Amino acid sequence: MGAAIFVHAYDTVAMPKKRSTKPAAKSTDAPALDGWITHTELASDDPIATKAWCAAVLGWTFKPSVPSPNGEYHLFAYSEQGGGGVRQTHASETPGSMPVVHVADAKASFEKALSEGAQEIMPPTRVMEGVTVAVVRAPGGVPIGFSGP
């Protein structure tokens, strides 16, 4: 996982009108987002083909791509509030998608996830001022990203 993958997490937030549950802790930068999926990442064996398909079939628009250690990261928007990115799969990775959840404290959430049985994929990494990201594999094998201060 490259650190550049979550840069637009706050630019691409989908906010439903009602919430059924509220997270216990709130961050100071975007407290209404805590516990919400704010970014979706698609890992593809052919990011250019995936990008073209998403645009043609789903109507998603793409922002300028950004470089990452594993090639171009193609930022998309499926609405004014929601989006994510398409990137190249890593050598041993299967194509798929990963939700990124906004949290009050990325390091604390990462440590709690590990203490509750998750496995480390990417430790907390600061990607820009005020934004730290981390990725774990939750029990059952599901990758989950965290993004927050």
Image (cartoon, helix red, strand yellow):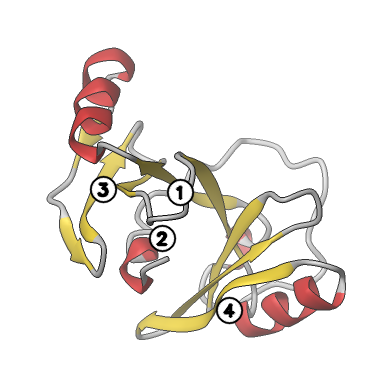
The quarter of the picture where residue 8 lies is: bottom left
Q: Could you tell me how far apart the alpha carbons at marks 1 and 4 are, in whole angstroms?
A: 17 Å
The answer to whether marks 1 and 2 mark residues whose Cβ atoms lie closer than 8 Å is yes
Q: Which amino acid is tagged 3?
A: Leu
Task: State the residue at coordinates (63%, 76%).
Answer: 27
Q: Helix, strand, or loop for circle 4? A: loop
Q: Which amino acid is tagged 2?
A: Tyr
Is 24 above or below relative to 88?
below
Q: Helix, strand, or loop for circle 2? A: loop
Q: Helix, strand, or loop for circle 1? A: loop
* Left or right of residue 121: residue 19: right
Q: Which amino acid is tagged 4?
A: Thr
Count up the numbered dots: 4
Say which residue label 2 marks. 10
Q: Specify the label residue 75 is tagged with.
A: 3
Compare marks 4 and 3 and give the one earlier in the sequence. 4
- Could you tell me residue 60's position as x and y percent? 28, 28
- Could you tell me residue 79's position as x and y percent? 35, 32
Is 115 above or below relative to 41?
below
The local crowd at label 1, few if under 14, some if 14 to 19, many if 20 or more residues have their Cα within 10 Å, is many
Is 1 above or below relative to 124?
above
Is the N terminus in the top left, top right, bottom left or bottom right quadrant? Answer: bottom left
Say which residue label 4 marks. 28
Q: Could you tell me how far apart the alpha carbons at marks 3 and 1 are, in whole angstroms?
A: 13 Å
Task: State the residue at coordinates (31%, 69%).
Answer: 4
Task: State the residue at coordinates (35%, 55%).
Answer: 11
Q: Which amino acid is tagged 1?
A: Val
Outermost front residue: 92
* Left or right of residue 65: residue 94: right
Task: State the residue at coordinates (82%, 48%).
Answer: 21
Q: Specify the label residue 13 is tagged with.
A: 1
